[in-house]
Image (spheres, rainbow, N blue to C red):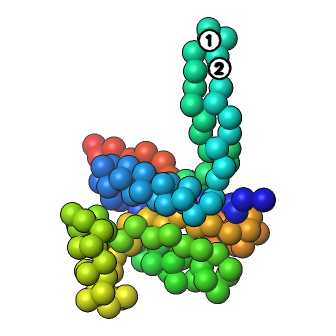
Amino acid sequence: MPPRCVLVLDPAAPRWLIANAAAVLGASAGAAGAAALGPDLTDASGGCWPAIAEIVVPVLAASPAELAALRTAAPDAGVTALAFPDLAQSSPTYADYAAAVARTPTADIGVHAVALLGSGNAVRKLTRHLPALTDPVPVP
């Protein structure tokens, strides 16, 4: 059975960053085996719809401090945390990202988003207090 996957994002981040983090973590979670693709589908008109992941991925909201805490707490809960840190977003290549991580202490790495992979109970225990990601409230 594939692990449960939950995506947790910083709701205060700019929309482009939320979208980028979700795309990167979605690809990472898929590569980590979080989801199998269903079969390609054909609609009633004969149009082809290529396969998508068979799992539901809840999208929740958390502050950067909460995201960092989730990343830290995940291993003790038996959950894999795939993080999208500020260093990844600001690095033009993976080699640049790797070098930035190597020279930066953990406490100085900001986290924009995490994907949590694990048993349903373990992931729910970490995330049950978090709200769903919703549209920001417009400023009057």
Question: Looking at the rendering, in which quadrant would you find the C terminus?
Answer: top left
As drawn, the label of residue 36 is: none
Residue 67 vs residue 45, the one in the foreground: 45
State the residue position of label 2: 42
- Residue shown at 68% from the left, 44% from the top: 54
Locate the N terminus by quadrant. Answer: bottom right
Label 2 sits on a secondary structure element that is strand
- Can you see residue 131? no
Amino acid on which the number 1 mark rests in the picture: Gly
The answer to whether 73 appears left or right of 10 in the picture is right
The quarter of the picture where residue 103 lies is bottom left
Query: So how many labels did they put on this image?
Result: 2
Question: Between 3 and 76, which is closer to the camera in this rendering?
Answer: 3
Query: Local crowd at mark 1 within 10 Å, few (<14), some, or many (≥20)?
Result: few
Quadrant location of residue 88?
bottom left
Q: Is residue 30 above or below residue 53?
A: below
Residue 41, how many percent across, how many down?
65, 26
Residue drawn at x 64%, y 44% as measured from the top left = 37
- The residues bearing labels 1 and 2 have C-alpha atoms spaced at a distance of 6 Å
Residue 92 seen in render? yes
What secondary structure is found at the residue carrying circle 1? loop
Q: Are marks 1 and 2 in contact (CB under 8 Å)?
A: yes
* 111 w.r.t. 3: above or below: below
Number of residues whose C-alpha sits closer than 10 Å to that of mark 2, classed few (under 14), some (14–19) or many (20 or more): few
**Foreground residue, 11 or 21?**
21
* Depicted 12 relative to depicted 105: above or below: above
Residue identified by numbered label 1: 46
Find residue 3 and report its image quarter.
bottom right
Name the residue at 48% across, 48% down: 134
Q: Amino acid at mark 2?
A: Thr
The spot of residue 124 in percent (x, y) is 70, 67
Q: Residue at 67% of width from left, 81% of height from top?
A: 77
